[in-house]
Image: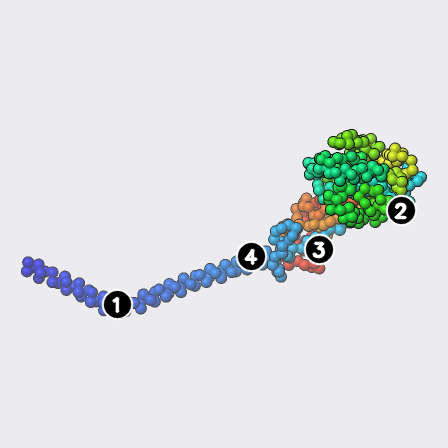
Amino acid sequence: MVSDEIAGAPMASSVAASLASNVAAWPYARPRRSVVRSRQRRIYWRRRLVVVACLAVVVAGSSWLIAGRGAHGFVTSSDEGSLRLAHVQLPTLVPIVPAETKIAGSLPGLPFPSVGESAVLVRGVGLLGATPDEVSVPIASVTKVMTAIIVLKDHPLGDGSGPVFTMTAADHLAWEQAVANGDSSLEVVAGERLTERQLLEALMIPSADNIADYLARWDAGSIPAFVRKMNAMAASLGLRATHYADASGVDPASKSTAVDQAILGAYAMGVPGLISVEDHPYMHFPVEGTAPSYNPVVGQDGVIGLKSGFTDAAQICLVTAARRKVGERIVLVIAVTLGQPSSLYGAGEIDLSLLNAATADLGVHQILRAYEPVASVSAGWTQKALQVYVPVHMTVVAWPGLTVTTVIRPAVPVAPGAGRGWTPGTKMGLVEVASPGGIQAVEPLRLNHFLSSAPLGWSPGATSTTVSGSS
């Protein structure tokens, strides 16, 4: 035991010495570690700064490459709804087809009546002809065309029949008063239920004056308020010779011309629901029973409307609308005859003869051929000859002597110009062919060959860097 203690003494002694040595070394070991760590931190931050600097160079270089020298950032295109580059140079389109084309030939005379006034209009094409020196005259129940337009625009029928109305004793009394005055009317009794569609049918087919007043009060609260709406609509349509004094046409102060009523008739036939309520030779009503139309030509030769009228002041008035085939197209032709002394059947014969003569004068005429160049492409950075073309024939319905206009509407897309350029077939805009009655045809303008984008830094006035024929 004594020997073990004596043997362990040197070990304890060496451990103590080692500890003493380490403790003695601590003051000197700490500075050595701080130096190493500082060096590692410096290396770490130096590397981070290098990485950040490289990233900054990459971002700046990318921006320069994308935006080009002198770019001012991005702009938003309301047409494309996406970001476009402000610097992109766009080519311009220079028309190489006539702005106006006159259809060959001259228009034959139309069979206008010797008294009164008449007009013929083709919807979407224009006014084909009218009697000279027209003046504003009473139009009787033709007034109800505007009444129907206002009601249908304010209360569309859609696919249904609209709200249901219950007639009252006051409504029956209004009918009795209309009968006593000799006005056209529809018999109604208290408790009778009629839909909006039925009321409009009564307005347009048996031409009921009492129903015209009923609809006016329902729509606007009073007849004077409704008349103000009628005149406002006439003004908005440019019917300068038209003035309304009532909703039915009984008042001779409701006046217009044949030309104005032809324009209104063409507009009316486009109002949803109107054709469906008046294209009938007769209609059945709960109390009145079967009521015939006063329009004697509905259902003949494509006639689908529109309205007749008669008063002592206006005499016989008739607006006739018919669908007619011209080539492979169906067009709507409107004939109007006012102030006829004979009869509704006589006015109907006049309108039919005008419709037939107008249809014979109409034809389908080619204005632009398919793949015909219609504009040259002007781009200052290239000498390459480029054009745009239409992919199909462009035709119009017209009569001899009518002037048709061709309008080029450039709309060069920006996006292709930010890359290599515009590929063949790229849509570069639109071409419209129009007659006085409106635009008849619209087609895209397509690029015929590849057009390179402008070189970076190119600006108008700079010398082109692209040789002729290259891309």
Kindly report which numbered mark, 4 or 2, lies closer to the viewer in this rendering: 2
Report which residue position mark 1 lands on.
26
Asked which secondary structure carries label 3, the reply is: loop
- Say whether disc 4 or disc 3 marks the residue closer to the N-terminus: 4
User: Relative to residue 1, is residue 402 depicted above or below?
Assistant: above
Report which residue position mark 4 lands on.
62
Kindly report which numbered mark, 2 or 3, lies closer to the viewer in this rendering: 2
Position in image of residue 20 (x %, y %):
20, 67
* Residue type beneath disc 4: Ser
Kindly report which numbered mark, 4 or 3, lies closer to the viewer in this rendering: 4
* Residue at position x 70%, y 50% in the image: 411
* Residue at position x 73%, y 43% in the image: 218
How far apart marks 4 and 3 lie (CA) works out to: 26 Å
Report which residue position mark 2 lands on.
135
- Which quarter of the figure has residue 329? top right
- Say whether disc 4 or disc 2 marks the residue closer to the N-terminus: 4
How far apart marks 3 and 1 lie (CA) works out to: 80 Å
Asked which secondary structure carries label 2, the reply is: loop
How far apart marks 4 and 2 lie (CA) works out to: 72 Å
